[in-house]
Image: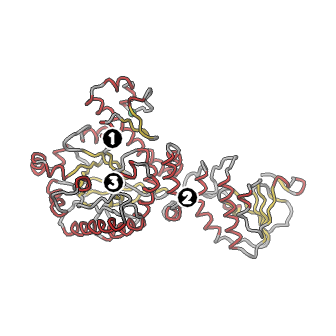
């Protein structure tokens, strides 16, 4: 049990948690966004990030500070909090990124962790190797072994109250990510960044990102706070939180701003292409696109960075509220519709339904069936598992329509796509209270048929009659042969049927 992280609420594998950062004397509510501060170029001051944007935690790079004589001296002299003018929690990176970019750095894990401790870092980081995607497996394994040595070195450094990151690497091999997650979890380190996913996000490989995170999550315990390292685009926050990520860091707000790019939850726009500003933040309500374009370079960069931060924090609030309301997957569905690659990410998420189902709360506020993907949600899987435990004896009518007045059936169950059959007594229980469109799609019928098949398989002595409202052939094919099927459109009320 990691006692500095407590989970308060959850939806899918996403959670609202509290990360206690003892050295800073603060508790950070997660999911949290850590704006990246480049100590050489401050676009929005940390004090303003705290007071105007509500940032409780930020991240800066201890290696840059270590390498720069002036910054080095100042940080040791006054400490990081005073140097940056920030009272919240400060995480520092170690130079691993520079190692990946330039192939060599001049510090070891022990040296940089000691330096981080000396400058007053609240959450420090060892020197791991961020192995990029798609490398040969042998390279991924070799570099992972080096990262795991770094974690062991980190355990040996006396870091007092400073929390320490245990990065999880393994390239695009989900089984290596799982193994790395398990090894990291077994250390006494505190926070778990999933590393080297930026190249996946930059090339819109959200499905591969989901598989990598799912692998790491299988190795890490549920109580492990997870940082999706380098993930700063608000478009994918909902998806990443649904997978169980708790911390995000954004360099994107500043880097994109420098490049004239304007973040939205549906993707990235170029300022030069915008005729309208689809946002109500203080920047967008007080400027027209022409005014933003006319601003001088530094001013434009600051204005765009502030907009980018507003839209990022706003989306994080939306995600948190969705967790509280129990409709995070509905938000993920909405975001998945903004780009085909996001849809791939959502579909990849649903391929991990069994894994999600173990964390998804049993009861929530609502289930809106919004797309064919909804048929594959964890709630549907859970209902099918429950069907295997329900008894049905004698002759049982499974019907989408009315209740027959005669007594030719021992029991009458309702059938609702995508769930399939259930006893009427369960009608008012989640998720069977779901709102499903009247114009249901093929995936919902097919999944309901899977439910019928599951029930029939568990009750081989029972005679089932399925009265359906005109299911497509692809659904009826999934119903076992020993289940009698009829369309309710062919049963008239005079034959003892009343409509509901
Ligand atoms: Zn704005």
Does residue 285 sit above or below 183 in this rendering? above
Tag 2 secondary structure: loop
Using the image, tell me which numbered label, if any, was put on residue 234.
none
Q: Residue at x 51, y 60 (%)?
A: 361
**Among numbered discs 1 and 2, the one appearing first in the sequence:** 1
Q: Residue under circle 2? A: 363
Q: Position of residue 269 (x, y in %)?
A: 41, 35
Q: Is residue 269 above or below residue 390?
A: above
Decide: is 311 above or below 58: above
Q: Residues within 10 Å of mark 3 (few under 14, many from 20)?
A: many
Q: Mark 1 to mark 3: distance in Å? A: 15 Å
Q: Is residue 371 left or right of residue 480?
A: left
Q: CA distance from mark 1 to mark 2?
A: 36 Å
Distance between the alpha carbons at the discs numbered 3 and 2:
31 Å
Check whether the beta carbons of the residues at disc 3 and disc 2 lie within 8 A of each other. no
Quadrant position of ligand 1: top left
Q: Residues within 10 Å of mark 1 (few under 14, many from 20)?
A: many
Q: Position of residue 390 (x, y in %)?
A: 66, 70
Q: Is residue 389 left or right of residue 137?
A: right
Report the number of discs.
3
Question: In the rendering, at what x and y percent does residue 174 appear?
Answer: 42, 64
* Tag 3 residue: 229
Give the numbered dot on residue 253.
1
Tell me which residue sits at (50%, 51%) in the image: 328
Q: Secondary structure at mark 1?
A: helix
Label 3 secondary element:
loop
> Where residue 440 sits in the image (x, y, percent)?
68, 49
In contact (CB < 8 Å): disc 1 and disc 2: no
The residue drawn where x is 53% and y is 44% is 337
Query: Closest to the observer: 130 or 244?
Result: 130
Q: Nearer the viewer, residue 230 or 466?
A: 230
């Amino acid at each position: 049990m990691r006692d500095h992280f407590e989970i308060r609420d959850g939806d899918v594998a996403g959670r609202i948690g509290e990360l206690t950062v003892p050295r800073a004397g603060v508790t950070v509510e997660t999911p949290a966004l850590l704006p990246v501060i480049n100590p050489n170029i401050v676009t929005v001051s940390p004090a303003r990030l705290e007071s105007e944007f509500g940032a409780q935690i930020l991240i800066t790079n201890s290696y840059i500070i270590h390498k720069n004589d002036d910054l080095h001296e100042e940080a040791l002299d006054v400490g990081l909090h005073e140097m940056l003018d920030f009272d919240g929690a400060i995480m520092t990176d170690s130079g691993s990124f520079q190692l990946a970019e330039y192939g060599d750095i001049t510090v070891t894990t022990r040296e940089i962790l000691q330096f981080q401790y000396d400058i007053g870092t609240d959450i420090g980081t060892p020197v791991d190797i961020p192995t990029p995607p798609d490398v040969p497996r042998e390279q991924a394994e070799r570099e992972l072994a080096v990262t795991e040595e770094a974690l062991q070195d980190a355990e040996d450094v006396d870091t007092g109250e400073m929390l320490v990151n245990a990065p999880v690497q393994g390239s695009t091999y989900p089984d290596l990510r799982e193994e790395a997650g398990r090894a990291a979890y077994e250390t006494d380190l505190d926070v778990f960044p999933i590393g080297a996913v930026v190249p996946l996000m930059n090339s819109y490989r959200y499905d591969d990102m989901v598989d990598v995170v799912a692998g790491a999550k299988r190795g890490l315990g549920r109580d492990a706070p997870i940082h999706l390292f380098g993930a700063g685009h608000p478009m994918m926050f909902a998806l990443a939180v649904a997978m169980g990520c708790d911390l995000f860091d954004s360099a994107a707000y500043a880097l994109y701003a420098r490049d004239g790019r304007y973040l939205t939850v549906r993707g990235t726009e170029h300022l030069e292409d915008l005729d309208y500003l689809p946002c109500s933040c203080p920047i967008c309500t007080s400027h027209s696109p022409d005014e933003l374009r006319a601003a001088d370079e530094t001013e434009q960069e600051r204005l765009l960075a502030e907009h980018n931060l507003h839209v990022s924090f706003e989306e994080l609030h939306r995600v948190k509220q969705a967790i509280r309301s129990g409709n995070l997957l509905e938000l993920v569905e909405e975001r998945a519709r903004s780009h085909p690659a996001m849809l791939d990410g959502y579909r990849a998420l649903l391929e991990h339904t069994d894994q999600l189902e173990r964390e998804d709360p049993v009861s929530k506020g609502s289930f809106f069936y919004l797309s064919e993907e909804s048929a594959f949600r964890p709630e549907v899987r859970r209902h099918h598992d429950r069907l295997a435990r329900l008894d049905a004896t004698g002759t049982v009518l499974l019907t989408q329509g009315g209740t027959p007045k005669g007594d030719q059936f021992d029991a009458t169950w309702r059938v609702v796509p995508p769930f399939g059959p259930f006893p009427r007594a369960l009608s008012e229980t989640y998720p069977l209270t779901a709102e499903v469109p009247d114009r249901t799609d093929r995936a919902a019928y097919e999944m309901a048929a899977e439910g019928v098949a599951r029930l029939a398989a568990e009750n081989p002595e029972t005679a089932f009659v399925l009265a359906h409202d005109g299911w497509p052939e692809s659904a009826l094919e999934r119903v076992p042969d020993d289940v009698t099927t009829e369309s309710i459109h062919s049963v008239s009320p005079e034959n003892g049927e009343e409509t509901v």
